[in-house]
Amino acid sequence: MTAPVAPTAHPPGLAVEGVVVRYGDETVLDVEHLELRRGEVTVVVGPNGCGKSTLLRVLGRLVTPDAGCALLDGTPVARMPARDVARALAILPQGPTAPDGMSVAELVSRGRDPHRRWYDQWSRDDERVVLDCLEVTGMSAFGNRGLDELSGGQRQRAWIAMALAQDTRMLLLDEPTTYLDVVHQLDVLGLVRRLNEERGLTVVMVLHDLTMAARYADRIVAMRAGRVVADGPPDEVVTTQVLREVFDLESEVVRDSVTGRLAVVPLGRAAPEGEPAVGGAHGRLAR
Amino acid sequence: MSPAPVAPAPTSVARTRTRSRQASYLLASFLLLGTSLALGMLVGSRGLTPWSVLELLRGSATAETRAILVELRLPRTVVAALAGGSLAVAGAVMQAHLRNPLADPGLLGVSAGAAVAVVLAIALLGVSTPDGYRWFAFAGAAAGAVLVTAFGLLGSSRRDSSPATLVLAGSAVTAFLSAVTGLVLLLDAATLDAFRFWTVGSLGAVRGIDQLAPVLPFLVAGLLLALAQSGTLDALVLGDDVARGLGRRLGPARLSGLAAVTLLVGSAVSIAGSIGFVGLVVPHAVRRLTGPGHTWLLPQCAVLGAALVVVADVAGRVLVHPDELPVGIVLGVVGAPLFLAILVRTARGR
Amino acid sequence: MTPSVKHPGASSGRAPSVGPTVVLPPAVRVGPLSAVWRPRQVAVLLATTLAALVVATVAVGTGEFFLGPGRVLEVLGGAGTRREDVVVWQVRLPRVLLGLVAGVALGLSGAVVQTVARNPLASPDLLGVTAGASVGAVAVITLGGDDPVGGVLRGLGVPLASCVGGLLASLLVFWIARRAGAASGLGPVLVGIGVSALLGSLVSWLMISASIDTAVRANVWLTGTLNGRSWHELWVVVAVVSVCLPVLAVAQARLAPLALGVDVARGLGVRVSAAVGVLLVVAVALASVTTAMLGPIAFVALVCPHLARLACGGSRAPLAVSGILGALLLTASDLAARVLVPTVQVPVGAVTALVGAPFLLWLLVRTRKEPSR
């Protein structure tokens, strides 16, 4: 029983309207209006505790907001049956754990659950999708290994394979590259970008690394203290001014000559007005 | 040499636990313990006033008052405090090593081993006083711990350093030993008659402070060993890999942890009988107060665990005056709702 | 919208397909139906079912009046003498069948609770059932008498009082868990431990306040026994189990995603609160009825999921195998209990750990860190 919603007001994709989330007395998230269009890679950045994970969890229906709602193609997510939501969007929370002894293939096949019928537990489609997802994430050779035997990067790719097996058009990733070394970060982000380009997968992810965000995002949403401070393509958002406002970070933003994308050179903590920046002379590499 | 403060802080709890705040909590706990010790000395079937204590110190108390204070109340209160503190600390150490909040120090086979030894002593050797049980309890506790550790080691391959195997081995050995205990109790009603009082704590039978003395070194050793491990415990809670990365050597750390638990629980059980609940529940409650860092958690557990058992003992003397409720029962009846209230009040919205 | 600049690393994720490739579990497919084919699990299931039936047959034949297994089957077929009929049909068969069905109930209950709680130490007793049932039963045994309160208790009888006690206790646990905002994962278990401690103290109090004879009787009940149990108890357990089985058959599909954690399960489309609620209600019902009819049987619900998991390989306790192992363990323990001490009818609860624990330890040592399937 969805409320009648004018189609023009809500273009297809994920959106939040008037969402407020509180933990006790603290307001953790307060976003009036945010739209994530289909086919884009959106990266959410912000300092610790700014609510970016909470935003993702509200979008992924893991958290029920105290006010407002998340919308999927115009319909409030809370009113949709859980399986329908799981077939439309896949969310990978932070630091997921699996029971001891689970193999990669077993984990990935769990991603097929939203599509499974009780009488058809292991269809040819399921098999095909699982193999495909293992291939795409480069985990085919590790399929029968236990998750606990893998490196951090491999494990993360296995979880992403599971999310991909859900065969959704939207993918939400909460800090998929934290704890990964640089090469693995490039692997994961490159994979995500490729899936976006080749399959039109809409991706929303939370990242810590600003340079990676600038490199891989079509659009960046910067948050602070539960609110959206900036929202737009990297060229607009990744600027010295915005970074100072969002992160209290004094920085220089340059365009790197190899990829042609923006890169952030962090200089130090931003000082209150009138004092020199902490951490080194402005314009030189601090540290 | 202070341990790295660790364990991820819950993102939604607003309070920060600064050093000064922790210190003030600890001070408050000590005051609480002091008050309960005082209560322990003064409350009972013969109510005494603080003046009686002064008279005792000045040497001018009556023989009767002296007997009550020195022979009964003082040893009993001290035993209760030591047992409570040891069990609570042992519980915290177990939970950290096994990374399992359901871990009870009994899981190491110490309580079950002690029980089996006591039951066999009663049934086969006719021992019938708590004083007599004491060394059997201790020996049984040590034997239980050795069995569990042996199986835990046998059951894990070189790669597997997770505590899961130790947990399973612990439940298996504990269940086996408890079954042996149960079987003997079923077959011999006289043993049941004696044993059912031991299982709720034998504080009522404590007489004179000198029975405490032989066990004290073990108890203190266990306490020191546990406190020395604070840093390692913080690291262990994060996982074996992280702990290794932080420079802790797992083998020796595990063994000293198990040794500490055995010493603490063995001592507690041998001086106070079997007291449940404290080892499992006090660390949980205290953690809500101090947070997960063991530098503060362990001392707080010791002090608050001690206070809890002393207060429970006092309550047992008062609630059904002139009879006495054993401390194990009071702990359950009073302590459990307290624990539940803590769980509810410190719940975080998820 | 996509920028034209090539992203470095965009194609680095695709690894060449050399070396071992993954082997997916084979399927059994018939028309629109399909299922995963797990030969090891099927083999274990068949072996344990066979073992349970063999042990049951031997158990029916064992006792003061001994019957060989072949003779037992003949008597069951109708070819027995009057005396044999009485012994088999009225005394032994209901008891053995009760052991089988109650064992299944406990095995299933344990597997569900351990998977939902994601903790190898979790068992249904921790949800308050056992403690509540014990309070009810011990109250009747020790307080039942001629005074007004005692009269009411005695009228209730032990089974009903323990059933009511168990259900009330678990309701209390769930209510508190919800108030504490911890209605899934480890939450109910922690609350259950608190409630069990409270109720356990009540039981201890009743035990020490009673006369030694009453205490002995209460102790026998507290250990869990099949002594004196007959068709009446069997039908009650069968009734509850037959209601729970279909519900469990449907709900068990949620166990696999729940094992990955609440967030991931929700992401996979599981309605977590509803699923956990149904699963725990079933687990409590199964444990409750068993405790009410037999007393609290230690260890079966805790150990059978582990035995099942170790025997079948894999990461979770398979429900069916866990259930059958429960039946096997309980029946074998009862048999052992009856022959252990010739003159005394030892309660089965005293023996389950003696039989089950060494088995678990042996499996632990034998299957150290096997690669998963």
Image (cartoon, coloured by chain):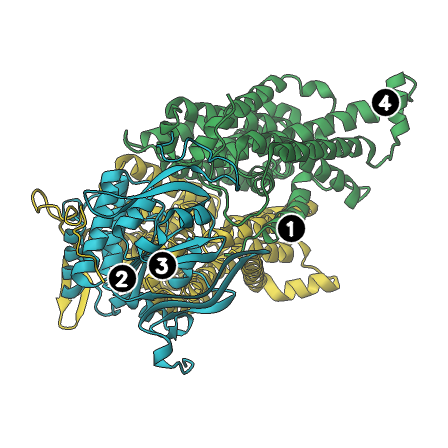
Chain colours: A cyan, B green, C yellow
Q: Amino acid at mark 2?
A: Glu
Indicate which label's residue lies in the foreground, 4 or 2: 2
The location of residue C256, given as percent across then percent down, is: 32, 57
Q: Is residue B7 left or right of residue C357?
A: right
The location of residue C348, given as percent across then percent down, is: 45, 48
In terms of secondary structure, where does tag 2 sit?
A: loop
Q: Amino acid at mark 4?
A: Arg
Q: Badge 1: few (under 14), some or many (20 or more) residues near its Cα, within 10 Å?
A: some
Indicate which label's residue lies in the foreground, 4 or 1: 1
Disc 2/disc 1 C-alpha distance (Å)? 53 Å
* 4 and 3 marks in contact (CB < 8 Å): no
Indicate which label's residue lies in the foreground, 4 or 3: 3
Disc 3/disc 2 C-alpha distance (Å)? 26 Å
In terms of secondary structure, where does tag 3 sit?
A: helix
**What mark, if any, has residue A40 been given in the picture?**
2
The answer to whether marks 4 and 1 sit on the same chain is yes
Residue C350, visible in the rendered structure: yes
The answer to whether marks 3 and 1 sit on the same chain is no
Residue farthest front in this picture? A274
In terms of secondary structure, where does tag 1 sit?
A: helix
Residue B156 is drawn in which quadrant? top left
Which chain's residue wears label 4? B
Disc 3/disc 1 C-alpha distance (Å)? 32 Å
Q: Amino acid at mark 3?
A: Ala
Which chain's residue wears label 2? A
At 31% from the left edge and 49% from the top edge, which residue is drawn?
Answer: A213
**What mark, if any, has residue C265 been given in the picture?**
3
**What mark, if any, has residue B337 been given in the picture?**
1
